[in-house]
Image (cartoon, rainbow, N blue to C red):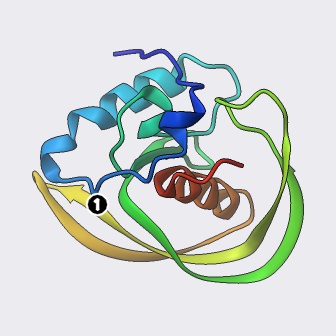
Amino acid sequence: MIKELVKDEAILSQRCEKATAEDADVVQDLVDTMESIEDCACLAANQIGVTKAIGVYLDEKHEPHAVFNPRVMMGLGAQKVFEECMTRDEPSKVTRYAKVKISYDELVDGELQAKKRDFTGWAAQMIQHMCDHCQGKLV
């Protein structure tokens, strides 16, 4: 279901609760909402009012992927970039890594499975943005 984006900083600045397999329905709401917004490449659950650590991003083929409880473990190649956010009015200058290793949970057959993965370039920037949202960090 398409949800309205939340711009309330009080909600967006709260650290999200750990997500469980029972939160799987949030993924479809994130995908539906993301697909309804032009040029949207990623969303975190708190951006639609759900304070669970879940994010969805589009890969290079525009396929959606969900990450539960994402966390940046390591970053290489720090750089300052200007970044926009669907729930903020102005772009922000932030530090992002060119390459990151994240840990996250993935929903497989109704169960969350722990994963680790490296991301580079644009995908790395999106993942870091979603991780910030899950931590309650406003860009």
Amino acid carrying mark 1 in the image: Glu
In the figure, residue 85 lies in which quadrant? top right
Give the left or right position of residue 13, taking residue 32 as reference.
Answer: right
Q: Would you call the spot at circle 1 few (<14 residues within 10 Å), some (14-19), or many (20 or more)?
A: many
- Rendering coords of residue 109 (x, y %): 11, 54
- Rendering coords of residue 46 (x, y %): 44, 37
The quadrant of the image that shows the N terminus is: top left
Q: Relative to 72, does residue 60 appear above or below in the rendering?
A: above
Q: Relative to 77, does residue 114 appear above or below in the rendering?
A: above
**Residue plotted at (28% across, 57% down):** 18
Q: Secondary structure at mark 1?
A: strand
Q: Relative to 77, does residue 30 appear above or below in the rendering?
A: above
- Rendering coords of residue 48 (x, y %): 44, 27
**Residue plotted at (62% across, 61% down):** 128
**Residue bearing the label numbered 1:** 106
Give the left or right position of residue 51, taking residue 134 as reference.
Answer: left
In the figure, residue 90 lies in which quadrant? top right
Give the left or right position of residue 96, taking residue 74 as reference.
Answer: right
**Residue plotted at (76% across, 67% down):** 96
- Rendering coords of residue 103 (x, y %): 41, 74
**Residue plotted at (32% across, 37% down):** 27
Q: Relative to 105, does residue 61 appear above or below in the rendering?
A: above
Give the left or right position of residue 127, taking residue 48 as reference.
Answer: right
Q: How many marks?
A: 1
